[in-house]
Image (spheres, helix red, strand yellow):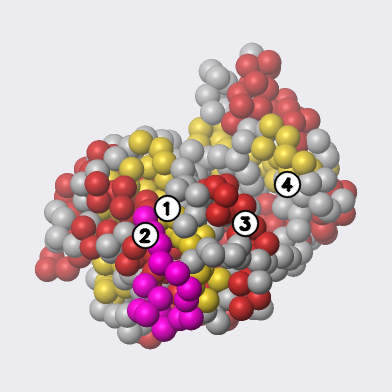
């Protein structure tokens, strides 16, 4: 292994696994002791060895902490070697099934769920924000896109379970940090790009470049691009792998969604594809943007040889996505929805999707997260106030920031809009007020946290699930 990497090494060991965290170490692991932003993983090398690690991968600084007589591999940049090392260790398991990597500012989670529904859970695997499932069974996963060692270990499980397709969310962080190096997706999918993660990326161009890198030969054999926004159109003409395009807004594309109709419990459309193929599509989620998500999934699976009509039938049977346009029903005479929308474009998309099926008012409960991009906060407020009738500004996850200061920034964005706006700091009280205000035909939207089961305030995570709180408020009103 050391010779393969061109590394300096000492000793021999039979390595059967790879871990980055001492809490994950099992007997036989190679422990990767990497430099971090606040400390060096080498500090924990003795603990990793005591937990069963048989060797350590690190750099010159980390080597100082490796226990005597412990085999080691030393590289100048050990993190860069991890993806290929992990893939080699598990014998390149992703070659045993189709891999679809999905990126975009919004819609990644929904698209992976739709892909799972398209083929049936028993044939599919999903990796993403809400978690990982292999053949419909939850598996442990900490990040939207796991670090390379954990990812290759998951792929090995999928190979054992004879999975046919893995649909995986690919974040811009993962692309920038090399977490999906070491293998190549069969299909890379680009959904859209809007403002987000500017606390990590320097600007929108850097953010776009990270996303666009998915559709290069280093990461994908082919690509599917939704060309409904300027970034998709740029990528479709500049990608270096074969591209299939998708449009829901009249742009020229290989797959075009037409005759889109909003229904109370979903959206229907016709998809016009290559060679005069025509597919009737029903997506059990509101909004043209969910048609785009579904069409992208259909195009990606069709590229891999699946029948588009069968894929459409599977999508129509999707049970929905936790915390994504998720309805909460306690017998009330208005609609109540929880959604993960926590960026301006997502707020607009959700509210616009609900407008055609809302005969009354749209009442939205919204906030913004702390310790994240400050610039999007007034944009969130403006989006909510422009597209809803009533806006209740509340706390999201303040994290280590002062909640009132975050709310003030969101409120600044609402000032030029005509919506009725109020501020209620406590999130539970804000949801209760929205329910109290709602009348027949209205829609209450609780936005921002979606599937999350906790609220982080002053660095402490408190149990809080928007869906449970909303249901309790609905039942109390009844």
Distance from Cα at disc 2 to Cα at disc 4: 45 Å
- Nearest to the eye among marks 4 and 1: give it: 1
Q: Quadrant of residue 167?
A: bottom left
Circles 2, 4 touching at the beta carbon (< 8 Å): no
Q: Quadrant of residue 99?
A: bottom left
Magenta range: 1-16
N-term mark: 1 or 2: 2
* Residue 45 visible in rendering: yes
For the N terminus, the image quarter is bottom left
Q: What kind of element bears circle 2?
A: loop
- Nearest the viewer among 399 and 299 is 399
Q: What kind of element bears circle 4?
A: loop
Q: Badge 4, how many Cα within 10 Å: few under 14, some, many 20+?
A: many
User: Residue 102 at x, y = what percent?
Assistant: 40, 61
User: Residue 342 at x, y = what percent?
Assistant: 63, 53
Please give the name of the residue rendered at 50% of the width and 49% of the height, measured from the top-left corner. 52
N-term mark: 1 or 3: 1
For the C terminus, the image quarter is top right
Residue 84 in the magenta stretch? The answer is: no
N-term mark: 2 or 4: 2
- Nearest to the eye among marks 4 and 3: give it: 3
Direction front: furthest residue: 69
Is 49 left or right of 239, judged from the image as shown?
right
Please give the name of the residue rendered at 57% of the width and 54% of the height, measured from the top-left corner. 48
Question: Measured along the vertical axis of the image, is residue 232 above or below residue 273?
Answer: below
- Nearest to the eye among marks 2 and 4: give it: 2
Badge number at residue 397: 4
Q: Badge 3, how many Cα within 10 Å: few under 14, some, many 20+?
A: some
Mark 2 lies on residue: 14
Mark 3 lies on residue: 46
């Amino acid at each position: 292994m050391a010779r393969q990497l061109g590394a300096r090494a000492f000793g021999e060991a039979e390595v059967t696994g790879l871990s980055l965290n001492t809490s994950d170490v099992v007997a036989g692991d190679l422990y990767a002791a990497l430099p971090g932003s606040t400390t060096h993983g080498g500090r924990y090398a003795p603990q990793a060895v005591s937990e069963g690690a048989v060797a350590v991968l690190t750099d010159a600084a980390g080597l100082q902490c490796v226990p005597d007589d412990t085999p080691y591999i030393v590289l100048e940049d050990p993190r860069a070697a991890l993806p290929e090392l992990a893939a080699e260790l598990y014998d390149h398991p992703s070659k045993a099934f189709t891999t679809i990597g999905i990126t975009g500012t919004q819609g990644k989670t929904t698209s992976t769920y739709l892909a799972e529904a398209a083929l049936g859970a028993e044939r599919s695997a999903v990796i993403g924000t809400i978690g990982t499932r292999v053949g419909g069974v939850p598996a442990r996963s900490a990040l939207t896109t796991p670090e390379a060692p954990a990812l290759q270990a998951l792929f090995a499980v999928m190979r054992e379970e004879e999975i046919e397709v893995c649909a995986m969310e690919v974040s811009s962080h993962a692309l920038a940090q090399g977490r999906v190096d070491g293998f190549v997706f069969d299909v890379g999918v680009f959904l859209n790009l809007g403002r987000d993660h500017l606390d990590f990326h320097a600007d929108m161009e850097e953010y776009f470049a990270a996303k666009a890198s998915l559709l290069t030969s280093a990461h994908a054999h082919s690509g599917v691009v939704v060309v409904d926004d300027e970034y998709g159109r740029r990528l479709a003409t500049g990608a270096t792998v074969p591209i299939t395009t998708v449009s829901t807004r009249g742009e020229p594309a290989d797959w075009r969604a037409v005759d889109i109709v909003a229904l109370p419990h979903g959206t229907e459309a016709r998809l016009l594809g290559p060679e005069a193929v025509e597919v009737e599509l029903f997506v059990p989620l509101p909004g043209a943007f969910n048609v785009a998500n579904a069409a992208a999934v259909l195009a990606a699976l069709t590229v891999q040889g699946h029948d588009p009509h069968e894929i459409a039938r599977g999508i129509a049977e999707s049970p929905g996505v936790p915390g994504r346009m998720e309805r909460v029903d306690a017998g009330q005479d208005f609609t109540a929805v929880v959604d993960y929308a926590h960026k301006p474009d997502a707020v607009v998309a959700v509210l616009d999707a609900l407008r055609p099926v809302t005969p009354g008012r749209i009442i939205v409960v919204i906030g913004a997260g702390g310790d994240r991009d400050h610039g999007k906060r007034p944009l969130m407020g403006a989006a909510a106030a422009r597209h809803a009738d009533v806006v209740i500004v509340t706390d999201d996850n303040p994290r280590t920031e002062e909640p009132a200061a975050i709310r003030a920034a969101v409120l600044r964005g609402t000032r030029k809009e005509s919506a009725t706006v109020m501020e209620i700091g406590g999130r539970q009280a804000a949801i209760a007020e929205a329910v109290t205000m709602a009348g027949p035909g209205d829609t209450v939207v609780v936005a921002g946290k979606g599937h999350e089961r906790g609220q982080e305030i002053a660095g402490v995570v408190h149990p809080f699930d928007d869906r449970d709180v909303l249901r309790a408020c609905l039942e109390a009103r009844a």
